[in-house]
Image (spheres, grey):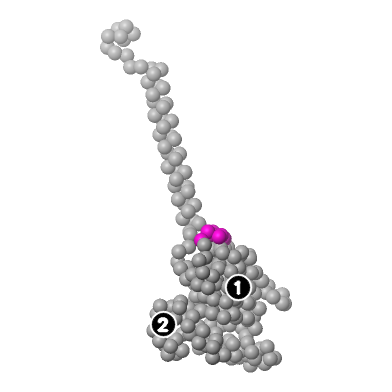
Amino acid sequence: MLARIRKDIQVIFERDPAAKSVWEVVLCYPGFHAILFHRLNHWLYNKGWVVLARFLSQVVRFITGIEIHPGAKIGEGLFIDHGMGVVIGETAEVGDNVTIYQGVTLGGTGKEKGKRHPTIGNNVVVSSGARVLGSITIGDNVKIGAGSVVLKPVPPNCTVVGVPGRIVVRDGVSVRDRQLVDLEHNKLPDPVAEMIFCLQRKINHLEERIAQMEENRGESASVQHPQQGKGDVCSA
């Protein structure tokens, strides 16, 4: 247990440049508090103390703003940055070295029993306000853009953005070290902007074609009807 706590603290230092000291992490990081108490609640939940585990999870939610169901399975190295509004459902599974930002929901759909929440792979970054819903699998080394709504499985090494979530990068960037977590979730492609640029290039091309056609038409008209000079016979 102490080894895992030390690792949780080390993870925060690795991924948050604002962390200055161990005491600051222990006292001021709600994500650390939520994960720490979730391990206790998860143990109680598995032992059959369901009501007590749920009650303690609600107390932690009131204090931290982070709601993690005691039944959720959390791997090592999870970092919840700020964390206000984060919700992780009962049957959700989170892999190792995952980073979750504020406002993220790992939620379920429908009222069916059994597995109804997502499974998150290793080295995944879920950006602010993203929603991952349903019993779907998010592969390793995936980036989910801010505000995205992911409703379908995502293979490994992809970047997902938009509503609904669309894969915009797949195996496009080599992962140099699988143990290092890529936190540059601001560097994501914008499919809407790319479409606008594509339309602008098409418009420019069409304008050039129209100008060229008008120029050619003007030249052909001058050849068919040349200007007649003053000394021309027809003008007499």
Relative to 175, is 204 above or below?
above
Vertical placement of 187 versus 44: above or below?
A: above
Q: CA distance from mark 2 to mark 1?
A: 26 Å
Q: Is residue 8 magenta?
A: no
Specify the segment rendered in magenta: 166-173
- Identify the residue at horizontal 54%, vertical 70% (top origin): 178
* Viewer-nearest residue: 33 or 204: 33
Q: Which residue is mark 2?
A: 19
Q: Position of residue 86 (x, y in %)?
A: 53, 78
Tag 1 secondary structure: strand
Q: Amino acid at mark 1?
A: Ile
Residue at the right extreme? 113
Q: What is the x, y in percent for residue 110?
A: 68, 72
Q: Nearer the viewer, residue 27 or 17?
A: 17
Decide whether the magenta segment is chiefly helix, strand or loop.
Answer: strand
Q: Vertically, is 211 above or below 147?
A: above
Q: Which residue is mark 1?
A: 120
